[in-house]
Image: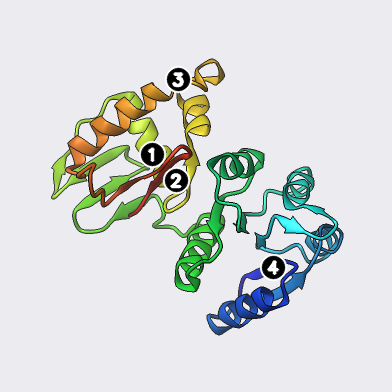
Amino acid sequence: MSAHILVVDDEFQIRKMLRIALKSVGYEVCEAESVSTGLAAAVRQQPDLIILDLGLPDGDGLELLAEIRSFSSVPVIVLSVRSADLDKIKALDIGAQDYVTKPFSVEELLARVRAQLRDRFPDKTASVLDDGHLKIDLARRLVTCNDKLVELTPKEYAVLAKLAQHRQCVITQKQLLEHIWGPSHAQNTHYLRIVVSHIRHKIGDDPTTPRYLITEAGIGYRLMV
């Protein structure tokens, strides 16, 4: 069965472009152009993923996102012209899994869609990430580089494992800090910067041109494996 994707955007040309692109790789697509029709489609269609614009004619897409989160954990990729860090952080904190700004690359968006659907429908090998250089075995709690064991502290492993569980997706600083250090440390971003720096050093990831641990400035981190 192919994945069913709901596109909520008030621009017909954007919806048409996304429909063609998504159908060309085998996805089923339904469309909505407002908060009200988007909510109705989300309830009626039960999509596997939602691509959501924020500037809708009858309200803010964030309102729709919050409403969807009250009854569903379906992955949501926000697709918006709003590029401010505050907008991205707010959408991710409300419950979006990813955020893409317009104008956008269709190929990049399709890659992010694939990443979200892999996370929603994990296969039996999803507990092991291996690109030939870096290997993260979540089941055995082992990390190796070029077949050599990487010794990580508990906090370092926890951060890397959290990112690995949601690979290629943005995890906000707040989400990482609350999950690993606890809710009282949600603002202690320097803890996270230090740990990420140590992880990069241990896996040989150049901080100036990182291959694995990508910083989304002011928002969080993304693991590319």
Q: Which residue is drawn at 34% across and 51% down?
A: 128
Which amino acid, mark 2? Answer: Gln
Q: Distance between the residues labelled 1 and 3?
A: 20 Å
> Which residue position holds label 3?
188
Are circles 3 and 4 on residues that touch, CB within 8 Å?
no
In the depicted structure, whether residue 45 falls above or below residue 159: below
- x, y percentage for residue 207? 23, 41
Callout 2: 10 Å neighbours few (<14), some, many (20+)? some
Are circles 1 and 2 on residues that touch, CB within 8 Å?
yes
Q: Residue at x 50, y 21 (%)?
A: 187
- x, y percentage for residue 89? 57, 40
> Which residue position holds label 2?
165
> Which residue position holds label 4?
7
Q: Which of marks 1 and 4 is nearer the N terminus?
A: 4
Which amino acid, mark 3? Answer: Asn
In the depicted structure, whether residue 191 falls above or below residue 71: above
Q: Which of marks 2 and 4 is nearer the N terminus?
A: 4
Point out the frontmost of discs 1 and 4: 4
Q: Distance between the residues labelled 2 and 4?
A: 25 Å
In the depicted structure, whether residue 142 falls above or below residue 56: above
Q: Which of marks 2 and 3 is nearer the N terminus?
A: 2
Q: Residue 161 — which label?
A: 1
In the depicted structure, whether residue 34 falls above or below residue 181: below
* Residue 219 in view (yes/no): yes
